[in-house]
Amino acid sequence: MRTKELQIFVYEYNNISELPNEDQGLVLKAREASSKAYAPYSNFRVGAAILLENGEVVLGNNQENAAFPSGLCAERVAMFYANANFPDVPIKAIAVTASNTKGLLDEPASPCGACRQALAESEIRFKNKIRVILDGTKKVQVLQGIEMLLPFVFKPESMK
Ligand code: THU
C-alpha cells in the first residue's frame, strides 16, 4: 500500500485590482457576459470569458431551458463557441464570474464537474494548460491548469 499526496495550488487575491492586467481584463469581460445570461429559472447568472492563444476573447453565459437539462453552463457555451470558431487555437485562460439576485458573488463560484471535464478535453487536445480565474468581489482565485480543479481527470489515453 502507498499513500500519495497531491498538491493543488490556488493563488488568492482580495479583488481584481490585484490581478495581472490580462487576468483583470478577462474578468471584466466575464462580468459583462454574465449580465447577458439567460437564467430565468435559477436567477443565477454566470459569465465566462475565454482568452485564446491568438489574443481573441470569446464570451459565454449560461443558457437555461424550461426542460432543465437542456440548458448549458457558461463555461461550456464559451468553450464550444471558441472551439467551433477557432478549431486550431488553444485556450490560454478562462475567467468565470457569477451573480445572483443580490449582485456579484463575494466568494468565487467554481466550475461544475461537467465543465471541468470539458475544459480538460481542450487542454489535452491542444496540449496547453488553461489558466482559470474565478471571480468574487471579496476573493479571486487563480489556478494554473484544469488538473488543479479536477485531479484524476478522465483522459482519452485511459481508453487504450
Ligand atoms: N452554471 C454555470 O453556468 N456554470 C457552472 O459551472 C455552474 C452552474 C449555471 C447552470 C444553471 O444555469 C445555473 O448556473 C444554476 O445552476
Image (cartoon, grey):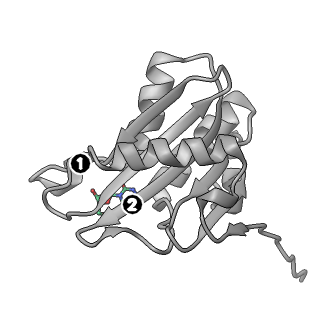
Kind of residue at disc 2: Ala
Circle 2 sits on which residue? Answer: 98
Quote the CA–CA distance across marks 1 and 2.
16 Å
Quarter of the C terminus within the rendering: top right
The quadrant of the rendered image in which ligand 1 is seen is: bottom left
Q: Residue at x 20, y 54 (%)?
A: 39
Taking 106 as reference, is 131 above or below it? above
Q: Nearer the viewer, residue 3 or 49?
A: 49
Q: Is mark 1 within 8 Å of ligand 1?
A: yes
- Determine which of the numbered discs, if any, sits on residue 71 in the image: 1
Name which residue lies at 50% across and 68% down: 137
Query: Looking at the rendered structure, which numbered label has been put on residue 61?
Result: none
Pointer 1 with pointer 2, Cβ within 8 A: no
Residue occupying the point 61% across, 16% down: 88
Q: Amino acid at mark 1?
A: Gly
Please, is residue 122 above or below residue 151 in the view? above
Classed neighbour count for the residue bearing mark 1: other residues with Cα under 10 Å, few (<14), some (14–19), many (≥20): some
